[in-house]
Each structure stands twice: as structure tokens, then as C-alpha cells.
Amino acid sequence: MGFDQNSAAERAKEDLSKRLGIDAGKIETASVSGKEFPDASLGAPVDDEMSAQMISSGWEITLKADGKNYQYRGDKYQLRLKDYNGSNHIVVS
Amino acid sequence: MNRNNIWIHVGLALIVVVFAGVLGQIDRWRNALRSTSDRTQTVKPMTTTRSLQAGEPEVLVKFRAGVSLSQKAAIAARNNDRIEDRIELVRGLVAIDDLDDADPQTVADHYASMTDLVEYAEPNFAIEVDLPEFREVQPTDRDDLPDNAPNDPYFSDQWALFNEGQNGGKAAADISARKAWAKSQGSGDVVVAVLDTGVDYTHPDLVSNIWIRPENVPQYFDAELGTFNDRYGFNAVDNAADPMDQNGHGTHCAGVIGAEGNNGEGIAGINWNVQIMPLKFLGRGGFGTTKNAIEAINYAVDRKKKGVNVRVISASWGSTQYSKALENAIKAAGEEGIIFIAAAGNASTDNDRRPHYPSNYDLPNVISVGALDNNDILATFSNFGAKTVHVAAPGKDIVSTWLNSGYREASGTSMATPHVAGVAALILANEPDISVADLRKRLVGSTDILDILNGKIFSGGRINAAKALGE
């Protein structure tokens, strides 16, 4: 597996569509931007996870649905949903 | 076919062969250039904006389940478009190139209107990306270096070892490696476990300093996992013997500790001679579980009990989650004479208030490490803690070994940690019987005090290898 920005954004949209139970066509890609994160978990660690403490490049993907923003973070190896219902989630790794 | 046709065909065949040969040569040149780049350049992120180029797909269309590829191709053809690519990660998603070069939003709207076939369609938007800005690592100009500097070509870029103000740094903001090397350049009797993403044990600058299980040490046996022919270490991610690094992070840390020095290749490690034991518990993405970290620590402790001189574990990882089991595993390592050097974390936060683990475990064998830049200033990302972060070490823009026999610059308390682990190994080379308690006391008590670290770092200073060796 290897993500790029586009496939990460599309995969995020597919994930959010399933989580919210809405058609993906109703989800807007508000922004996708390159960003440096504090560690290999892209600053979105899940329970029972340890990560390399190296500044890591990736993408921050903001999706918008029903007036709310949802933040995904990805790099070539992974995609995470940050702070959804109070916790972070690994979508793909 | 008449004679004239034959010559036409022969001529065309020759043209095709020559053209293929030229293309092949261009590809070989390109590969050679790429290979050279991997080995000699380091990466710094740079934000830029990507705009769509001619020929790139204009729209991304997600067809509904049940629409076959041939149907999609037929729909595209009807619109004078073509399917440029299928995006396997998202079922039904294709990238479409509009051969009329119409406005991408118009094309996307057209596809989106086919609601019985298409779930959604959108322009292939331009995205801000972090493209690598390649900064050439300058080979050392020997005339600019002192006589006792190693001959490794990138040594002049290793400001952490020898800072004479290069690249905007501050002279002497380093760990005084050259002075230390006058006393010790390490020892092949000292084993440092790099508990990380594994290590590329074939890297030309590491291969001589990789631990190999001696014949008199039995294969690793775990009651649940079985027996492993652990030639180079252990892989807790896959429960396998092979700890090959697929990420690069562990290889980078290993190079700081023990890239072979004065070998005319790449960089110099803090230890020119040492044994690096690769332990893999972080996967290719650089993250892993507490359970696998414990499995890998158990391996190191087992090897110690079987006679392998593991005295240091370098741990450039962590989280804010406390684990009693992990704490106990690290404590057990300490009881076997192993010091545990841990990254303080990169959240720019105070570990006294918001603990980061394993660096915050209050154990007699744990040292927590913050990161400095080349001006002796705490890196903006580095965690700190007057009570809980014990020492600071260089951790920004650190050049070290990477995958594919390469070298790369990286930043983080991840990079500061192996500097301390490396100095610990240097001390052990000189004083093999030093206790963990005394080793810890020496490392924390021999720093160069920096006013700027007062109230931020327990020792108030940056590690100094020469002082740690009693200079």
C-alpha cells in the first residue's frame, strides 16, 4: 500500500461516509495541506500505541459534512481520523 | 511483400531498436542519478503548491458498486474522456482525463449528474504538498578540519559532534566528540540495543558494527512464540528473527550511536566501534504497540542473561499513555544492568505536568532526553521538564544513516536520544564494569550547563562526551 495526497483524501471521504452513514457526494473536501507532525503517529495516537519521536511529514485533510469539520491525517503508510467522538482512529495502516 | 516493402520494414525495425536503446539508456542515467541522490542528499521539507500539468487527470469519479470497468471505460469514451488510473485503495474510484481539456468542474458536474452510476465526482484539485528540498551534504574539505577529525566525508555536516559554526550554528555547541575520541572510540565489547523500527544491518556504514549472535549463545526461545534463529536481533512486529528496518528511523538512530568511524564512508558514529543490536517493534509506519515493545525488551534481557553484553537500550519513541507492564519490563532490564535512554517527546509540552512515557517512568535506569538545535537552544518541538527531563542533546537537523545505503537529515527527540545512548556506550567502553546507577549519574552529572535550560531540564545542560569520559 502507498498513499498519495489524492488517494488519502478519497479514502478519508469514503471512511467518513461510512461513519456518518451519508452519501459520499454530500461530503466536501474543505482542504488538503502538507504538514509536519510531531511524531510517526502524526500527532493522533490511538490507545496502546507508541510512536517514533521524529518530526514527520504528511497531509492534513479537512472534510466537511452537515456543517461540521472532520480532520484526517495521513502519510504514505497510514490514514488517521483525529478526535472523532473524543478519540483518534486508525483508518488504514 | 515486394523487395521495397522489405527494406521499409527493416528500416522501421532499426529505428524502433535504436529508439528503444536510447530510452533504455535514458532510464539507466535517470536511475543512476536517483541512486546518487539517495546517497548524497538530505531532505528538508518545503511547502509548495502543486498545479495540475497538461495530461494529468482532471477529475476523480467514484462509480457506484456494480459498475464494471468496461462500463466505466465506455461512459468515459462517450464523453471523449479516458480512464487514466484506477485508485485501488478506494473501490470504484477512477481518475479521468478529459481529452477536450474542458473546465474540470464542468466535467466533474457532468459525471456527478449520472446519479444512478456515479456516487460522486470532483476536480482533481491542486494540493499543497511537502516536497523535499534537497540540500546537498557537503563533503568535508579536509583543510578546514582539525587533524584528528575522522575522514568520513559528511563529518563536516555532523554539527552535533563538531560544531564550528557551520550552517548558521554556534561554535562549540556540540558534544565534544573529538576530545572524547582521544580517550575512547568505543569498543566492540559493548552492545547497544536499538529498540525501534529495526535497523538496516546491511548499510555499508553500519555493517561492521552490527551485533551478530555468537555461536555460544543459544537461539532465542520464547515459551509462547517458539524458537528464533536470531542472527541479528529480533522482530516483535512479525514475531520473526529478521529485524530489517522498513522505515528508516531505527537506521538513523543506529548511525548516530555507531556508524563506523574514519572509514571514508558517510558519517562517523559517536562510537567508531560498538555492537548495535537491532530490535524491531515499530512497523514501517513508525508506530507499534506496548505489548511488542515489552516483547523486544524481554528479548534484550534474555540475551543479557545468556551472556550478551547488552548494557544500553536506546528508545526514541513514546506516548502519553502509562503502562505498568512496560514500566516493569524496563525496571527488569535495569536489574540486569541495562540503562534505558528515552526520548522526552515532541509536543513542546512540560513533562512534569503532562507525562510522556517511557521517558517519565521514575526508574533508576531511565534517562529522559530533550532536543537542542545547533545554537544550543531547546528545539521548539522538544518537550521539557525541570524534574522529569534529565539531559538535553543535539536533536535538530541531524545527518545519519538511512535506508538504501543512504543518509538523511532528521529532527526530533528521537535524534537526541541516541546521542546520549552513544555517550553511554563510550563510557562503557572505558569502564565496562560501571554500574547502571553510576553510569546514569555520570551522564546526568557531566553536562555543559546552559543558562537557557535552567528550569527546563533537570541537569540544566547538554551532554558532553569528553566530560563524561572524565576529561
Image (spheres, coloured by chain):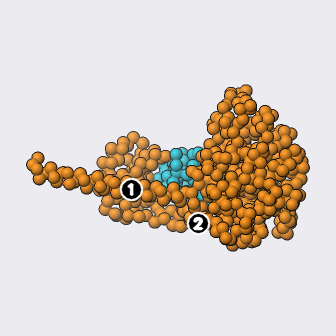
**Could you tell me if the residues under marks 2 and 1 are in contact, i.e. CB atoms within 8 Å?**
no
Per the image, label 2 sits on a secondary structure element best described as strand
> Mark on residue B135?
2
Residue A86: percent from the left, percent from the top?
68, 50
Q: Earlier in the sequence, mark 2 or mark 1?
A: 1
Residue at point 82%, 40% (across, down) = B333
Residue under label 1, please give it. Answer: B25
Residue at point 38%, 56% (across, down) = B25
Residue at point 30%, 56% (across, down) = B19
Q: Quadrant of residue B122?
A: bottom left
> Mark on residue A93?
none
Chain identity of mark 1? B
The chain coloured orange in the image:
B
Q: Is residue B306 or residue A48 the one in the foreground?
A: B306
The chain coloured cyan in the image:
A
- Front of the two marks 2 and 1: 1
Per the image, label 1 sits on a secondary structure element best described as helix
